[in-house]
Structures are given as structure tokens and as C-alpha cells.
């Protein structure tokens, strides 16, 4: 099992500023590269102070310029918000400028507030995503593409320059529901998923769905990989652990507001709303603990066959605390699990 660091793009205090936020992300990427992480992840979100990276491909190119070997994953690029005729060229360019280290994680969007304000309400995001993905794949793999669909209609065109990575830049599907994971795997996609604040039992259902889809592909699916994200943090004491769990609870009180809640946002800041899940229940389902306990708690992930654990430290800790936790993970946890997985290009089932 390899490790991926989710670059921290959350600032509860909006006065912190984007310049400092993005400088922190770049420093974290350099740190991950030095420490032997397999990948770093970059989100795409707009208009809100959680996971705030409006241009993930821009950040991917910058990270590549500042690092030497780490893979760079979008987690995830929200296809319904982009025009695929423009986006396909940007993907090719980013793949070239990252020297093939780009892994394009794609999804439909998750926050109703954001999607609605951007003109793609959640009610249509699924069907627009499906068509957008098909258009993107066609533009990347075929030289002359014409389209006559619901959201795209255009005469024959060729995206230039053509992809250097063949058959196209790596694409990874974001899916949360087990059946969505199963069907995406059967199409030949690498998968990235998360149980959010759900239990290990839910996580295992997601893993099983991936395995079922891969098994049905036989040898054609043997290269497919599963990346799974968890809110996680390494701590040095019980008091430190408790404080970070409280921070994670506050983070989820804002995350849930825009994910499943009413979307109460003022001047870009998401309101913290009451949660049904208790602090104690959340603590059981996220990975905030000392290194020794982390080794024990990650064992079921490795045994389940997860290829990459994405550590999401986006809970509002200081930069120095985040860098320290990254180092603890690399020195005291990663050696127990790392097997140097490298993602291979996906093959889309016809």
C-alpha cells in the first residue's frame, strides 16, 4: 500500500489569504516528494473556503516544477464545470508540463451550493458529467471528433497538441457509492473513493465493489488500482489527539453544510452547523492517532487490498503541525506498508 498526501486547501480564517494557502500546499508537496510519498492530491472547488483550489491543473504544473518524482493527482477535477473542448487541451498541456506525472481524477461535483452558483445544479450534474467524460475521452483518443449530444454539439475538430502519454493521460474515476465504484471499475477506470466519516464496514463495501468489477474484467482489469481517502493526522499525545479530533469535527460541521446540508455560506466562508454524529463516533471512523496506533488501524486497509491510502489532513491545523505529521507518517508508518505501487494508464471498456 502506497501513500498520498492530500494538499491542505482549507482555511477556516478567510483572512489567511490565498497566497499563504497555496505557498503551504507547495511546501507540503516538496516535503512529500522528499519523504517518499507516492503521490499528492489536489482538489477542485470554487467560491468556498474548504478544499479551495479553483485551478487544479495550474497547481499540478506548479507542483511538478517544485518536485522531482511524486505523482500529482486531481482529487477531483469537476468535469461538468468545464467545456471539454478547452479542458482536453489543458489536460494534454498539463500532462506534458508535469512530465507524465499527472493522474486526472474526475468527478461530477459534490457541493450543491458551488454547483448551483456555477450554473450546473446537482440535478443535472450526473448526466452532464457522463456526456462530458465521453467527450473528453473521445477528444483525447481520436484525432477528428464531432459531437451531437445534449450538452455538446460541434463539428469535427482535433485537440492540439496530441497527447504524449498513450493512449491518453491517466484518468481515475471518483466514486463513493459501492455500485458506482463497481460500474466505473468495469469500464476500466482506476478508482479513488472515500468513506468520508463512515465506518470501516462501509469502507470494506467500497473495496468489495472495486474487487467485483475488477474480477469481472479478468486479465484486462489486473492493472486497475484503488485509492482511498481518509481524514487522518499523526499525533504525539492523547491531548494532541483530542484537539485534532475537535478540529476535524468542526471541519465536518462545515463540510456537511455544503455536501448534504443547506449550503449556508457568507462571503465565501461556510457556516459550522450542528451535526448528528458525536465527536466520539467521528473519532472511531477517522484516522487521528499516534504512529503505533496508526500502524494497527491501517492494517485492515492493507489486508483489504487498497493500493493507495490518501491522507487528508485538511482539518485546519497549522503548517508546522501538518509538516510534522507528514514526517511522522513517513518515518514511523509508511515503512510497514509501502510496496512502491505505480499507476498504469486505464483502459476504457468498449
Image (spheres, rainbow, N blue to C red):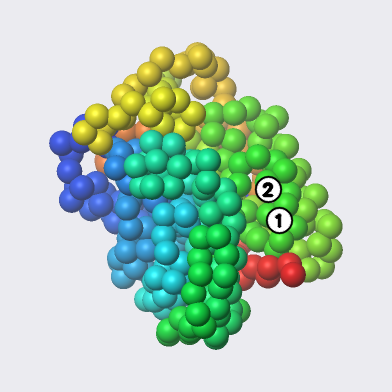
State the residue at coordinates (45%, 25%): 261
Instruction: Point out residue 219 in the picture as x, y percentages from the top left corner.
Output: 82, 68
Query: Where on the picture, by quarter, is residue 224?
Result: bottom right
Query: Where on the picture, by quarter, is residue 253?
Result: top left
Q: Is residue 23 left or right of residue 315?
A: left
Q: Quadrant of the C terminus?
A: bottom right
Q: Is residue 211 left or right of residue 339?
A: right
Which residue in the protein does label 1 denote? Answer: 185
Asked whether the viewer can see residue 152, the reply is yes
| Alpha carbons under labels 1 and 2: distance apart | 6 Å
Asked whether the viewer can see residue 235, the reply is no
Q: Is residue 232 above or below residue 41?
A: above
Residue 235 - label: none
Within 10 Å of disc 1 (Cα), the crowding (few <14, some 14-19, many 20+) is: many
Which residue in the protein does label 2 denote? Answer: 181
Instruction: Point out residue 285 in the picture as x, y percentages from the top left corner.
Output: 57, 26
Query: Where on the picture, by quarter, is residue 228?
Result: top right
Q: Is residue 34 above or below residue 278?
A: below
State the residue at coordinates (52%, 21%): 282
Instruction: Point out residue 330 in the picture as x, y percentages from the top left corner.
Output: 46, 49
Closer-to-camera residue (255/290): 255
Amino acid at each position: 500500500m502506497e501513500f498520498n498526501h492530500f494538499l491542505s486547501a482549507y482555511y477556516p480564517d478567510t483572512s489567511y489569504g490565498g497566497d499563504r494557502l497555496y505557498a503551504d500546499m507547495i511546501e507540503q508537496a516538496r516535503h512529500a516528494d522528499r519523504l517518499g510519498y507516492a503521490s499528492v492530491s489536489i482538489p477542485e472547488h470554487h467560491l468556498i473556503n474548504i478544499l479551495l483550489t479553483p485551478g487544479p491543473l495550474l497547481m499540478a504544473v506548479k507542483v511538478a516544477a517544485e518536485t522531482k518524482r511524486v505523482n500529482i493527482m486531481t482529487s477531483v477535477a469537476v468535469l461538468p464545470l468545464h467545456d471539454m473542448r478547452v479542458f482536453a487541451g489543458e489536460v494534454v498541456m498539463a500532462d506534458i508540463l508535469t512530465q507524465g506525472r499527472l493522474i486526472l481524477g474526475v468527478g461530477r461535483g459534490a457541493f450543491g451550493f458551488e454547483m448551483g452558483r456555477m450554473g450546473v445544479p446537482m440535478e443535472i450534474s450526473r448526466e452532464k458529467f457522463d456526456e462530458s467524460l465521453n467527450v473528453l475521452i473521445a477528444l483525447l483518443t481520436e484525432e477528428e471528433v464531432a459531437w451531437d449530444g445534449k450538452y455538446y454539439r460541434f463539428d469535427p475538430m482535433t485537440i492540439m497538441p496530441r497527447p504524449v502519454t498513450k493512449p491518453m493521460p491517466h484518468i481515475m474515476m471518483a466514486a463513493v457509492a459501492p455500485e458506482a465504484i463497481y460500474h466505473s471499475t468495469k469500464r476500466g477506470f482506476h478508482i479513488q473513493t472515500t468513506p468520508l466519516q463512515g465506518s470501516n464496514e462501509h469502507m470494506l463495501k467500497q473495496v468489495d465493489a472495486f474487487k467485483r468489477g475488477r474480477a469481472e474484467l479478468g486479465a484486462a482489469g489486473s492493472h486497475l488500482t484503488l485509492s482511498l481517502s481518509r481524514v487522518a493526522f499523526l499525533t504525539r499525545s492523547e491531548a494532541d489527539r483530542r484537539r485534532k479530533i475537535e478540529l476535524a469535527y468542526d471541519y465536518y460541521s462545515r463540510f456537511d453544510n455544503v455536501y448534504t446540508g443547506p449550503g449556508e455560506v457568507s462571503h465565501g466562508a461556510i457556516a459550522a452547523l450542528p451535526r448528528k454524529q458525536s465527536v466520539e463516533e467521528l473519532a472511531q471512523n477517522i484516522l487521528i492517532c499516534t504512529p503505533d496506533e496508526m500502524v494497527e488501524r491501517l492494517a485492515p486497509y492493507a489486508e483489504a487490498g487498497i493500493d493507495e491510502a490518501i491522507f487528508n489532513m485538511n482539518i485546519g491545523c497549522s503548517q508546522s503541525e501538518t509538516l510534522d505529521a507528514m514526517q511522522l507518517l513517513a518515518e514511523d508508518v509508511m515503512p510497514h506498508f509501502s510496496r512502491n505501487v505505480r499507476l498504469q494508464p486505464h483502459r476504457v471498456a468498449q
